[in-house]
Amino acid sequence: MHLARTGVFLWAVRSARLLALPVQRISLIDSKRWLSHTPRCLSSPFAAFPEQSAQQGSKVDPKKTEKTSASDHGNGSIPESQFQRSLASAPQNKIIHDTTGSGSGANILGQPFVFDDVSNVTDSILGLVGRNLYDTPNHPLHITRKLIESVFQYPLYKNHIASNPVVTTKDNFDVLGFPKDHPGRSRTDTYYVDSQTVLRTHTSAHQHAAFQYMSQNPEKGYTICADVYRRDSIDRSHFPVFHQMEGARMWQQYRMKTTKGGTRLMGQEERKAQIKEDLDNLPEHSLEIIDEGGHHNYKTNPVQISHDEKESELVVQHLKRSLELLVQRVFTAAQEAMPGTKQEQLKVRWVEAYFPFTSPSFELEVFWQGEWLELLGCGVTKQEILNNAGLNDRIGWAWGIGVERLAMLLFEIPDIRLFWSQDERFLSQFKEGQITRFKPFSKYPPCYKDVSFWVRPSPDGASPIGAESSSGVAAAAGGDSTKASPAETQPAAFHENDIMEVVRNVAGTLVEDVKLVDEFVSPKTSKKSLCYRINYRSNERTLTNEEVNSLHDQVLQQLTKLPIEIR
Ligand code: DAH
């Protein structure tokens, strides 16, 4: 089964899968423990979290972002326009045009935004903002979130959610060290509310705020769960909104009272000893692990200059063991949900990775029903990021995981659109604290329609922001320049994601997949022809011919706005 991305994309070429050293460990985990009810206060919502999105802009450290509120458009001295004021009382999450017809904007979750020439959010994407599926009891995404949180529990970890997806480009990219030409910043891959504001592409957008929170609070780690947004292809494992969870754990050098009544900073050696002790105290597990045994490639995946090598290695070991425990918990729950199927020995492998905000970095894959699946990305947090949040005296790890991927595996949900279904035949199948196998209710017929067009050369390019990345590689936080354009002869003229967006905007969840089925270059004109096949199919009912024809006509009509020539 081809499954949802983790939301974790690698930016650099993975290193070779080095030495395989399988390790067997014994399980001491009670796989049922997560089923018990978590008291409300233990996973309290984001109440005191210094969220950096629109509403709580003022709580953000002003040093961190020039534009402290995602809604002040970068310059607090510009007076609010009448249009902006009118947006404040406009219906939420809908594009509104001003009376002159030249400007537009939206009230996103109660906050007004006037669009500029970088804005590319659509009604269809805004309509999905604020559904909070991860916070809806009995929803498979909520059940999966709770299962993950049960491994990273309060009071050691603060379990946050982040309900407002509107964040600044600073928080989504800059503070995390993303280069200016990173493909994830491209308008073809990311939803811009305006030139300085995006719908977050990953939960790491809240990392800085979470670290700031940590600097003022006793918890030693956190998890964050939220919806994230990426312009992307359309198939059964990709939807422009999906969910991620992010986790981190830090160790601190702290002040101790001396016998003379003063204090002294507890040294790095003591911190190292603490990490070792915490590592030794982690439960054992029974996974089979394929790892290069800690001997990662120091050139391509280095220990940070400011870190002690041994201490960094201890952090890596603690990180790996913690995530192996997560896999053990989650997949044991899944195996228990499928009585009768052969209980296979769980196998995971560690692979080197690259993220702008960790070093060294890794990816965890799990062997599930005959396939290696990319599950999550992680690493030792860059010291600079910690220092910027006031955590100079800490060292630690972080990870990020795609919740749909896990939920699709756990519940055997075959199509990512189902998570958005409001059909009782879907929703009534799931119960809090239980992993159950999804029973498909009906398979409705597909309806295929092709669209062919010439790609016109365009000197301006389709994407003002970073479409032509010098990096030329796939990316953390989205941005996949490897498929940036099937029309490589006119690279800037056309981006496949623009086609996907038009189809999404017209057909929403009524489209199952869109595939490139033919391409050729005309020897006469050197123009490229592309043919995409759109599969209109609902998960909930049979679509009528009339309905599909009308949807397809609208798609064709909207495609004329792109720099392409319909054939
Ligand atoms: N933000 C990354 C992504 O979306 C996932 C991730 C990787 C998060 C490593 C982390 C991390 O915190 O340490 O691809």
Image (cartoon, helix red, strand yellow):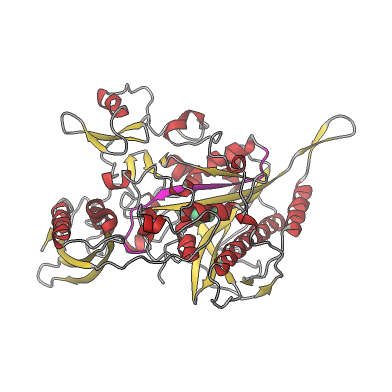
Which image quadrant for residue 310?
bottom right
- On screen, residue 522 versus residue 493, left or right, reads left
Q: Is residue 62 above or below residue 37?
A: above
Task: Pinpoint residue 417: horizontal percent, then vertical percent.
Answer: 35, 58
| Front residue of 63 and 198 | 198
Q: Nearer the viewer, residue 21 or 225?
A: 225
Quadrant for the N terminus, please: bottom left
Q: Is residue 68 visible in the rendered structure shown here?
A: no
Closest to the observer, 375 or 197: 375
* Residue 4 in the image, given as x and y percentages of width and height: 42, 63
Q: Quadrant of residue 278?
A: bottom right
Q: Is residue 38 left or right of residue 517?
A: right
Q: Judge from the rendering whether residue 443 lies leftward or rightward of residue 448; answer left or right.
A: right
The reply to whether the magenta stretch includes residue 152 is no
Q: Residue at x 38, y 44 (%)?
A: 199
- Tell me which residue sits at (55%, 43%) in the image: 160
Q: Position of residue 498 (x, y in %)?
A: 25, 54
Please say if 25 is above or below 80: below
Q: Which residues are magenta?
A: 218-236
- Which corner quadrant holds the C terminus? bottom left
